[in-house]
Amino acid sequence: MKPAAPGTRKLRLATTSLAGCFGCHMSFLDIDTRLLDLLEHVELDCSPLTDIKVPHPDCDIGLIEGAVCNAENVHVLRTFRARCKLLLAVGACAVTGGLPAQRNQLALPILLETVYHTAPGLVNGRIPNDPELPLLLDRVYPLHEVVHIDYWIPGCPPSADTLWAVLSDLLAGRTPRLAAGQVQYD
Ligand code: SF4
């Protein structure tokens, strides 16, 4: 990545995790010392890596890990879409629903009944219904079924080199193109 020209505006980068495990964020951190290069070009906005809770209204790039499983996920995702010029689905959960979408095999009422009423150790349990809890959706959705997505980065998680390649292309104003070895689906 070339050094930023003096006076060049840094791009605003926001990240979030919906129904994900933060493994994709760990992969992002695994770009390691290249993070220093990246921070020459970008200002890290709303992210689990900062204490900024809501994306700036004029973000350039949004990286989203995790699928959409509840009403809060929908709200966060729509906010990112409204505030980021480019939105990237990062990782298998964001791209296809991934592991969280395994619950799609069962209808939601049956799933809740199974988990809270009949699972070993939870017989006679109660299905949580506190109003503070985000409402579960009928099933788990990949991001592109809820909002427009500009780019998809598969992998569980995508490697640090893959994330670096995509970010390098975007910062250079190129359409990201991954080499065959950088596209993984496991
Ligand atoms: Fe975690 Fe894999 Fe989903 Fe990323 S794609 S959030 S690493 S389960």
Image (cartoon, rainbow, N blue to C red):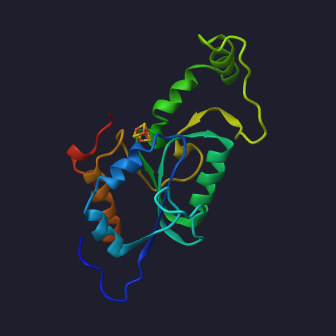
The answer to which of 51 and 58 lies nearer the viewer is 51
Q: Is residue 104 above or below residue 157?
A: above
Task: Identify the residue at horizontal 68%, vertical 11% (top origin).
Answer: 123
Position of the N terminus, as image quadrant, is bottom left
Question: Which quadrant of the figure shows ligand 1?
Answer: top left
Q: Specify the farthest residue to the front.
A: 121
Q: Position of residue 35 (x, y in %)?
A: 31, 64
Q: Position of residue 52 (x, y in %)?
A: 56, 64
In the current view of this chain or complex, which residue is farthest to the bottom?
7
Q: Is residue 75 left or right of residue 98?
A: right
Q: Residue at x 27, y 58 (%)?
A: 32
Q: Does residue 20 show up? A: yes
In percent of width and height, residue 37 lies at 28, 70
In the picture provided, is 4 more to the left or to the right than 99? left
In the image, what residue occupies the spot 44% across and 45% down?
22
Give the percent coordinates (x, y) of residue 30. 29, 52
